[in-house]
């Protein structure tokens, strides 16, 4: 469970090419991300490591409302909720009865989740390259321009212009694969979805600026 939590925090709180090719890749990514304002569906997350044959997997649901609201709900193997209203970010671990509250802008920043939200100028933070199509998907790779990002690259796979897979390779040799299914685009999502009320008795750790 600690590994799942740390990976998502990296995930939430996460190639040289000719200029003409880079511009084309940037435009292509922007075009795909413009297809939706609201996005929801289910996900399967699989974490593997170069150093170990042990694989962790989890499933859940997600809701996204551009430019900065999201709800990520892990249902198995442990219940965990990561919610942001754009200002605050709550991480609720149901088993531990713990809630961590963070500043949303600092937590999302240049993380991989920011790619889905489209809340940042991606070309200022990443080198973006077009990869060969595989798995019947169109792939783009984002390589961080700063070594402090904590990961080496993100691959984003689109099917018929819609987000289908993401692959994150971090600096510790771990690979996180996310498969998105039953995706719905631009269906209304009420703002209350992105608010969180701390349960009675839960321990609260506030990490927002005073």
Image (cartoon, helix red, strand yellow):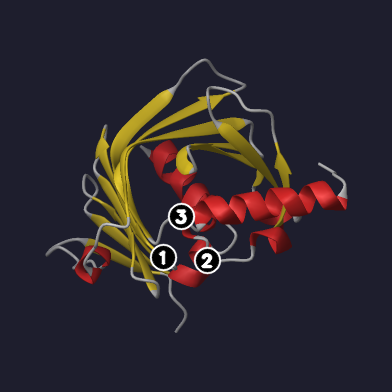
Residue situated furthest top in the rendering: 53
Tell which of 155 and 50 is nearer to you: 155
Where in the figure is residue 46, as x and y percent of width and height? Answer: 43, 29
How many residues crowd mark 1 within 10 Å: few (<14), some (14–19), many (20+)? some
Q: Which residue is mark 1?
A: 66
Residue 119, label in figure: 2
Residue at (85%, 44%) from the top-left corner? 16
Circle nearer the N terminus (3, 1)? 3
Q: Which residue is mark 3?
A: 35
Residue situated furthest left in the rendering: 200
Residue at (47%, 59%) from the top-left corner? 117
Looking at the rendering, in which quadrant would you find the N terminus?
A: top left
Tell which of 150 and 133 is nearer to you: 133
Q: Is residue 52 left or right of residue 26?
A: left
- For the residues marked 2 and 3, what is the alpha-carbon distance in whole angstroms? 14 Å
Q: Determine whether 182 is above or below 197 in the image.
A: above
Where in the figure is residue 144, as x and y percent of width and height? Answer: 71, 51
Residue at (49%, 53%) from the top-left corner? 116
């Amino acid at each position: 469970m600690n590994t799942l939590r740390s990976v998502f925090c990296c995930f939430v709180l996460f190639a040289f090419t000719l200029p003409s090719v880079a511009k084309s890749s940037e435009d292509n990514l922007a075009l795909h991300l413009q297809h939706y304002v609201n996005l929801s569906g289910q996900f399967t997350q699989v974490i593997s490591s170069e150093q170990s044959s042990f694989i962790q997997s989890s499933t859940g649901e997600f809701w996204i409302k551009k430019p900065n609201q999201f709800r990520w709900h892990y249902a198995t193997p442990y219940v965990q909720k990561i919610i942001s209203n754009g200002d605050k970010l709550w991480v609720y671990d149901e088993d531990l009865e713990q809630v961590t509250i963070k500043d949303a802008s600092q937590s999302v920043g240049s993380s991989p989740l920011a790619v889905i939200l489209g809340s940042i100028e991606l070309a200022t933070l990443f080198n973006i390259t077009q990869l060969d199509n595989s798995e019947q998907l169109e792939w783009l790779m984002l390589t961080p321009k700063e070594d402090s990002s904590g990961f080496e690259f993100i691959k984003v796979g689109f099917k018929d212009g819609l987000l289908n897979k993401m692959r994150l390779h971090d600096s510790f040799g771990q690979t996180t694969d996310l498969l998105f299914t039953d995706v719905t685009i631009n269906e209304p999502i009420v703002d209350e979805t992105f608010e969180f009320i701390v349960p009675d008795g839960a321990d609260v750790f506030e990490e927002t600026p005073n």
